[in-house]
Image (spheres, rainbow, N blue to C red):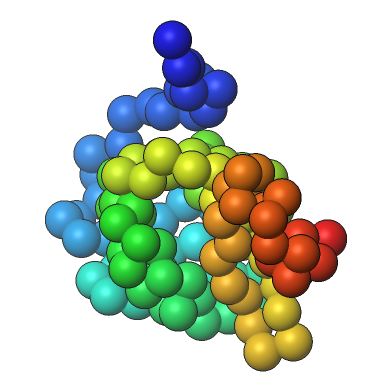
Amino acid sequence: MKTDRHKFLDKAEPENEPAGICSFSWGNRELRIFGEQMTLQVNGISHDMTSVLDELRDIGAKPEKTSPARWISLLRGKPTNLPGYDRPLMIVKTPSGYTVRCLETTSCRDDKSLQMDLL
C-alpha cells in the first residue's frame, strides 16, 4: 500500500481569505495566489511566480487545493507531492527565474540529461 509521506502537511485552509485568494507567510517570505497570478515576496522584494503556477496547472496539479505547509516545502526545494499529481515535484531556481521539476526515478535512470538537470 502506497502512503503519502506528506500527508501530515495537509491542514484546513484558513477561512478568512476571500475566494480565489491564498496568502500565507513564514519568516521573511510571503506567497500570494490570486486568480491566475502568484507572487513570492522575499525581504520586501516581489518575484512573479505565475509561470510556476501555470506549469503546475498544466501537469494537472491543483495549486488551489495545496496546503500552506506543502507550498513551504515546495519552495524550500524539497520533493513534494501536490493534490492532483502523484509524482514528487520541486521548484528550482534557474537563470531566468523559477521552474517546476518532476522527480520520477524510473525515467531519470533512462534520461541522463534529466539527471544532470536535477543535480
Q: Nearer the viewer, residue 33 or 86?
A: 86
Residue 112, visible in the rendered structure: yes
Measured as percent of width and height from the top left, residue 73 is found at: 61, 43
Q: Nearer the viewer, residue 97 or 27?
A: 97
Q: Residue furthest left?
A: 19
**Residue located 76% across and 64% down the image:** 112
Looking at the image, residue 21 lies above or below residue 95: above
Quadrant of residue 50 within the rendered picture? bottom left
Residue 44, visible in the rendered structure: no
**Residue located 55% across and 22% down the image:** 5
Query: Where the N terminus falls, by quadrant?
Result: top left
Q: Residue furthest front?
A: 110
- Apparent side of residue 66 relative to residue 15 in the rendered image (left or right): right
Q: Nearer the viewer, residue 24 or 1?
A: 1
Looking at the image, residue 110 lies above or below residue 58: above
Query: Where the C terminus falls, by quadrant?
Result: bottom right
Measured as percent of width and height from the top left, residue 15 is found at: 23, 39
**Residue located 47% across and 51% down the image:** 24
Measured as percent of width and height from the top left, residue 3 is found at: 47, 17
